[in-house]
Amino acid sequence: MSETTGKILMLLLTAAWLLPLAGFVVEIYWLRLSHRLHKGAAYCAVGCIGLGFLCSLSALLFWGYQNNWSALTESDHHAHAVAGTAAHASGSDQQSAVKHEEDDDDDEDDGDDDENEGGHTEHAHAHADDADHAHDPHADHAHAAPVRKYATGTYYELARFSGLRVSLDWYIDSLTLVMFVMVTFIATCIHLFAIGYMKDELTEEYEDHEVHLHGGGHFSRPGRFHRFFAYLSLFCFSMLGLVLAGNIFQVFIFWELVGLSSYLLIGFYIERKSASTAANKAFIMNRVGDFGFLIGMMILWTSFGTFQFGDRGEGAHAEAGLFTMVRGHDGKLDVSEDGKQVYLRNAEGERAEKNGVPLTISYVLLVAAGLGVFAGSIGKSAQFPLQTWLPDAMEGPTPVSALVHSATMVAAGVYLAARFYPVFTPEVLLGIAYIGCITLFIAATIAVVVTDIKRVLAYSTISQLGYMMLAIGVSGWGAALFHLVTHAFFKSLMFLCSGSVIAGCHHVQDMNRMGGLRHKMKITAYTMLIGVIAIAGLAIPGTSIGLSGFYSKDAIVASAMAYSELNPGHFLLFITPLVTAGITSFYMFRLWFLTFAGAPRDAEVYEHCHENPRIMTTPLIVLAVLAAGCAWGGEGGPLYRLIVDSETVPAVNRVISVGSSHVTLPSHQGHESDVHHVHATAGILALVSALIGMAMAYLLYVKKAVDPHQIRMQFSSVYDFLVDKWRFDALYEVMFVAPVHVISAWCVDFDRRVLDTILHGAAKVTVIAAKWDRFFDETFVDGVVNLVGNVTYTVGNSLKVVQTGRLRQYVMWIAVGVIALFGALFSAIPK
Amino acid sequence: MDFQALFQQFLHGGVAEQASIFDSVSIFLPELVLSCTIVLMLVARLISLDRLIPTHWFAIFGGMTSFILVLQQFWKLSMNEAVATKIFTGLAVHDEFSIFFRGFLAFFLVFVVALTVLTGIPDDEDAPDFYSLLIGAVIGMMLMASANHLLMLFIGIEMASVPSYALTGFLKGRRQSSEAALKFVVYGAGSAGVMLFGISLLAGLLGTAEFSELALRFDAVFTGRSGMQDPTVRYVVLALLMIAVGFAFKLSLVPFHFWCPDAFHGAPAEVGGFLSIGSKAAAFALLVRLTMSLGGYGSGVHGTNTLNSLSLSCGLGLGILAIATTTFGNLAAYSQQNIKRMLAYSTIAHAGYMLMAVSALLVLQSVQSDAPFQLAHPEGAPRAMEGLLYYLSVYLFMNLGAFSIVALIRNQTFSEEIDDYRGVAQQAPILAICMAICMFSLVGIPPLGGFYGKAFIFASVYEATNVHWFMWLVLGAGGLNTVISLFYYLRVAKTMCIDLRPAGAAEISMPASSSPALYVMLVAGMVVFLGIVINPLSVVARNAAHAFF
């Protein structure tokens, strides 16, 4: 990316980033500008984020225009990074063809088979050459610095501690651009929706029906419409800052700001105990993850001495960023022969040296750093074992849930894991894959039994985030981010739909009291259906035409399958997501059937329910269109190509780990890649699984072939286990909360009995000493001070005598002075 | 050399390091602008233009123009890194040091004129006279700042003094004022006479009156002579002493300070502020230049034994005067009931502090070795001078602030007794707070500007203790005096801020947005600012000091 292009993109994105901050400032002081009942705050917020969207979009278009949309047409986006590019170049033309078309795949499968096996064992193939291979004596480090795919720079340097710069940087590549467009767009829709959803707050007397006072009434307070939008703006500002950040420290700052904004928004109904507890829970759970993040950052700092992502400067003065330091320009980890050290690279991609000694980082430390940073992602993206905060976060207003679950908070975790991908070793990736795998399964099973409409969506979010993490873990980098974007669209859509249902039903959230709502809420029902189909990953069998979720989930399952083929020991990483795809489809359709289909189960709710005004339904329609079509073309389509344009080197090639775990990461690029090879099979399997899930939901909840209650009775223990959310909360209660209570009780005891006694004793002694001190002070010290004061005052007073006011005397003094001084000098100067 | 050649040399400057007459005039432009301002003001009154445009606008405009011209010279000099040039065939000198002081004085002039406008001390009828005198005095001070010749020294001092006498007695109707002016005139005349005698002695002995040649001649005359038995030495000591009396009068050093309390007491507070800052600054500039010249600056001779011992003797002598002055000033300020009298003694004491810097400068200078620019403490002497300049700059704001508040309160209560200041904070908090800031800064309490000024000076005195033990006494006296000065400064602050306003006392009102309040806040704000942001001014001061090193 040329420097000018980078600068222009930076300006546009910075505008998009800072606009919400300006909005925040205006909105938080709204009451000084206008009154509480005015909707201006909302318009201000919408205006800011909308303008931000326009800026982001024009940045994306400008970027595309600058390189003639080469990201979309030119398939071989990694030519710069790969040593032997011939193999890729040959296959590049066909690359643009839609990959999952089964016919094409069949043809090429034959040709790919032997290469795969060969590459496996002998590393004869070009891909294998690129593998991280410590023992390869011909490892070639001297690659010329390639054309950078990103632009980076510094806004402002905050401080410099010897080698370490703490600065505000920016880092822009196609991923940044896509994230910006996605975040600003979805946020705009949600802002618009929220204008309708939050209109109850436009009042001087908001009565909160969930808060019961002792007297029997409800708590009432002034409405907080403007404050809600202020927080939303702050949230967007934080998230955009996180995406634009050019160093890990800055990411951390905005990471915490995102945490803070989510805290404020989840606890928006702060008077409700459940809401304030949920806000605390979200915040504290995130701190647990951040602890790991901090450790990771410290390791990075001590070992690398930089927080920077990308390389800075050109030529001889270039300063290598983290990614280049770890991976060089060829994507290889330069591991020492004993496998214990990793050599760092300089900006040219060669081994970095300091005073003739090569710089290294211990392999274990690199793993630890990766795990630490990923721990932050675990917290933020609600992965196992820190997943329990996300369902509770449903206490916030629904637009917040939509924002948290699609574009901002949880996306931040996945984004960080993806951004940091080059620093992760294969061992770390394996860990990520298993964490994602566990999460996606646990969350999906819980979602099956939940009846609160928002909570179903919450668990589905956790599960989908698990998919993304899994994809990152199995080197499906592009697939993960692909799914992140598509998921953002359909999940925000579904949340807004559920918000629309909740608003229409006057804050009823229990699906058992709904049913048949599609007659009354047509737009909501059918846009929701689009979301459901999208997340379930349904497609028209045989044609490979489906909604966005189909393509992205397909990509993930394919990556997982390729991974488990290369590493048969880790077959669960493929089986679990496959099965879960079915479960996902089941619970999503269950949600839709229970809410919108069938007969009304609660006459009163049905009676009062109504479709919402246009300001709320328009965003639904817009989002529905995008949820359906954003992934158009699948892995040959524009969205995926835009994302993978900034795909990092190790995600492309097959990688064989050098650590103790011996995992092989599948290759991703070109027709001979491992993933491409299994794509068709994986797609079919995932589709079948999803169809089965849908069919079961249909049978159970529409046809009522089997009564769900019966099943519940039969497997009551399993059901209870699931309803209790796998008893995680109870487990944490026993593991962490109870011990802390015990220890704190001990501490209190110790405090009271020992420390307080000492303190009181010390206080008494001090009082006695102070009395003596006072006596001493008043008699002796003050006496001396007063004496000095009196003496000086007397002297000063006596000096007045000299100043007689008589002119004759004064003039005489001149003469006397001269003579006296001369006399003094005469006697003082040596003879 | 025929007349033609002489004339050519006069016009175009044939001698090295000397500017031609044209260059000299262009360098002299700020002073010329001020002179023209005086003429303009007087002409304006003749043709009744002052009815249309108030006279103070002329004064302010002239002062600003002059300041801008000095700034331009400063910029030019710092751009070209030019060396010092002598102008008007060596009568005056043009270097960073003189520019600093000329700028200082022009800047100060603008502030003083603004103050007189706010307090309305000259009425419309008297304004042209008042401002002519004021500007005339400033021109004299600027001449003092760039003087390079014993005659210029005398002319400058007199030119600064004579208008000051008239200014002191400007409130014609008041007996006290006239009496003060009379004392001032007679005392000034006496000391001027002594100084003139000293000048003639020195010039006669050395055969030159140009500063830059003094050291050379001095060295030639005195090599091999020592001790007071030698009559030449005795004469020179006497001559220097007599010149010192002139300075001592200007700086109000003990025992030549008698005029100061009476003059300040009688004069309007605005004039008191002007005299206490402007004439002090100019006198210090001149003192530093003269003593540095005697020590060999600009003469080509460096660090001969004679010159070094002369510097040392001067430094120690000034040190003695500094001790006497600070101690006397502080002690005498104790029991004063009138605030202007108290500030007069405070001025005396501060002259003592600043004299310590000059003393340290000369003592450090006296260990100069033969090689040019090689000092035993290479940074010591410049730092002492930097301290002096910093102190003067802060002193400008803190003393001006104090005097202007005195003037503003006088305008409302018609009293200058400290007792009548009780509880001003309740009625005009801004005045009380700004006064407290100025007082604290005069004591030298961090983080106000006065603290850093004092810290710089004491640091150089401390450095000078390495050269001569006597400086320990100076340092001790400085420290001790700072402590005892707390009492009378804080008495004012306490009276204004803590005491209750007695019933029946005259009302004082000073809304925060009124222009006098803004003026006072600006001045006090600068005191705070210079205590927090030290670097810019100290860099400028260091540059000015480097004119000598």
Image (cartoon, grey):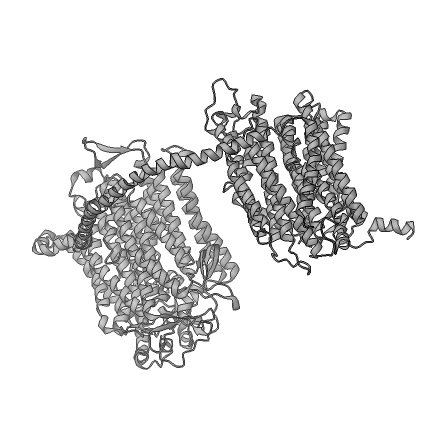
Q: How many numbered circles does the render carry?
A: 0
Q: In the figure, is residue A688 to the left or right of B32? A: left
The relative height of residue B103 versus residue B275 in the rendered view (above or below) is below
> From the viewer's perspective, is A580 left or right of B243?
left
Give A722 or B152, whichever is nearer the viewer: B152
* Location of the C terminus of chain B (image quadrant): bottom right
B345 or A434: which is nearer to us? Answer: B345
A600 on left or right of A823: left
Percent across and percent down for residue A68 are: 48, 62
- The answer to which of A467 and A724 lies nearer the viewer is A724
Q: From where the camera sits, is residue A521 visible?
A: no
Q: Locate residue B102: give its quadrant.
A: top right
Res A723 seen here: yes
Residue A674 percent across, percent down from the top left? 31, 73
Viewer-closest of A240 and B51? B51
Find residue A88 and report its horizontal and vertical position in percent.
40, 74
- Tell me residue B384's x, y (percent): 60, 49
